[in-house]
Image (cartoon, grey):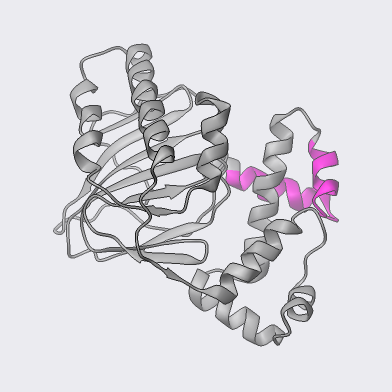
Amino acid sequence: MFNFIYGGIDFAHKLDAASNPTEQYFKHVHAFHEVICFVEGDVEYTVESETRRLVPGDLVVVAAGRYHFATVNPDVRYERYVLKFPSDVIPAFLAERIQTLGPFLGGENALSFAVYDTYYGNYSDEELKALYLAELVKFLVTLSKEPQATPHQTNTTIAAIVRYIDEHIRLPITLEGISEEFHFSKSYISNEFKRYMKISVMQYVRLKKIIAAHRLILTGKKKSYVAEEFGFENYSTFYRQYLKLLEDGSLPHSSDRRKKQGENQRET
């Protein structure tokens, strides 16, 4: 097991024993990409409107900006590799391809991920980052050439609402507007969305807007301009929510630090 956080990347091989579950599997969205290779456990994973009960060797590909969470049986040991990285550490064409991949891909992936274990502890931080990124790029190129989608459940109503929100992310979005668009009552949309996504519609909209706004901020745009661009009427409200996502690690930051082997991080 290892956890390597350095130079903008966060790669880990994690194991939660059934007798000592150590992590929380919470609902979140972040501005970096995440690839999870499932080794073993009893886990149901949801990415936006799609859900799958994972089997060994499964990949979960969470492109930047996609809402996701895991439902984990704490009585069963849960082992997985977790690779978190921003777009700017990989070639631009790969960052674009990740956005087009489905969230659930199959194959015999655990063996290929084991190479990360062989590097850990034998190289300096700079060398480890170079080796890990080289393996990541090679893996992503191969993966994007022949993606093997696995069967999963899709909630078509939620998928349509998510698509509508993505397409109108810079416009004012209200529950009333969503209700009119899909000809469902506000209560039906609220209940169905909360039941499936474990979050309210408007909480989801705010999260997605802030993640999208962050991308503009990284290009040099002023926060006040970006807040207005994405329909936040109150700048202080936007900035407070933006800082919260920065603090909980949902937005990429520049701090270079390396966690000691065995330390537990709160992540799915």
Q: Is residue 6 above or below residue 71?
A: above
Q: Residue at x 83, y 55 (%)?
A: 231
Q: Is residue 117 above or below residue 227?
A: above
Magenta region, main secondary structure:
helix
Query: Looking at the picture, how far across and down is residue 102, in whole percent?
Result: 46, 53
Q: Position of residue 8 (x, y in %)?
A: 48, 27
Q: Residue extending furthest left?
A: 19
Instruction: Look at the image and say whether residue 227 sits in the magenta stretch.
Output: yes
- Tally of numbered discs: 0
Q: Choose top left, top right, bottom left or bottom right for residue 31.
A: top right
Observer-nearest residue: 213 or 254? 213
> Which residue occupies 39% across, 46% down?
147
Q: Is residue 116 left or right of residue 178?
A: left
Q: Is residue 254 left or right of residue 258?
A: right
Up-down relation of residue 183 to residue 219 (above or below): below
Residue 246 placement, left or right of 130: right
Q: Which residues are magenta?
A: 223-245
Residue 50 part of the magenta segment: no
Q: Quadrant of the N terminus?
A: top left
Residue furthest front as drawn? 146
Q: Residue at x 70, y 65 (%)?
A: 164
Is residue 158 visible in the rendered image? The answer is yes
Instruction: Work out whether residue 249 can be spotted.
Output: no
Residue nearer the viewer, 8 or 167 = 167
Residue 128 image position (x, y, % from top left) = 32, 18
Residue depicted at 18% across the width and 24% down the height: 118
Give the left or right position of residue 58, taking residue 156 as reference.
left
Q: Position of residue 38 (x, y in %)?
A: 27, 50
